[in-house]
Amino acid sequence: MPTDNPADIALGVVLHDGGDDAASTLLATFAAELRAAGIDAGGLVQRNPVDVQGRARMELVDIRTGEVFPISLDLGPGSDGCSLDAAGLAEASRVLRRETAAGVALLVVNKFSTRECEGEGLAAEMFAAIAQGIPVLTSLSRRHQAGWEAATGGAGHMLPPDLTALRAWWASVAA
């Protein structure tokens, strides 16, 4: 994603330590706040509900419609492999394409993680929105920061996981 000045892109990146759902909750809360104020925010946020066996299951939720996309594979007890369901992720990606085509005011992309660092996951949809000039908000675990730098050239504004910081970033983008 080459640019003369990567910081000029309307891209907010919530940088967090990972390990919990706080960043996802923050993105969902902020998107709901914007929508309540009449701002056309759309995209995907992640939830990790616990199933009956006590395992966290990943799912993406369409901010606009509430539609849920399961993105976890059931690998069985004791498995330590990647449980991301690529087919479920591909199905959810249509939400980002729809919102980009509609020219949403803010596109929320649940996170930039391992797959996105490899140019997969939801990276193409995120970069397409940015290329169209649509402001994008995502989250990034510190453990993926080097991958972010490699994939984006350091684009965007790193934000603390704080609602006040997101509001200030949005005010600067929407001005």
Image (cartoon, grey):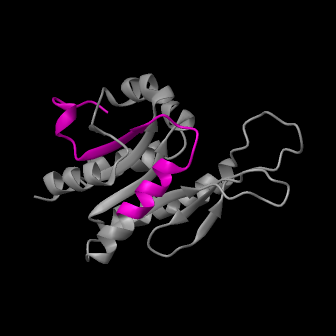
Quadrant where the image shows the N terminus = top left
Q: Nearer the viewer, residue 144 or 153?
A: 144
Residue 24 in the image: state x and y as whole percent: 49, 53
- Measuring 36% from the left and 44% from the top, which residue is drawn there? 127
Residue 9 in the image: state x and y as whole percent: 21, 42
Magenta residues, as a range? 1-30
Residue 115 in the image: state x and y as whole percent: 56, 36
- Measuring 38% from the left and 69% from the top, which residue is drawn there? 32
Position of 172 relative to 69 (above/below)? above
Position of 141 relative to 143 (above/below)? below
Residue 135 in view: no
Outermost left residue: 175
Position of 28 relative to 67 (above/below)? above
Residue 37 in view: yes
Position of 82 relative to 67 (above/below)? above
The verdict on residue 36 being magenta is no
Residue 92 horizontal side relative to residue 160, left or right: right
Q: Nearer the viewer, residue 101 or 70?
A: 70
Residue 15 horizontal side relative to residue 49, left or right: left
Residue 58 horizontal side relative to residue 44, left or right: right
- Measuring 48% from the left and 59% from the top, which residue is drawn there? 44
Outermost right residue: 77
Q: Quadrant of residue 5?
A: top left
Residue 171 in the image: state x and y as whole percent: 16, 57
Q: Quadrant of residue 175?
A: bottom left
Q: Quadrant of residue 3?
A: top left
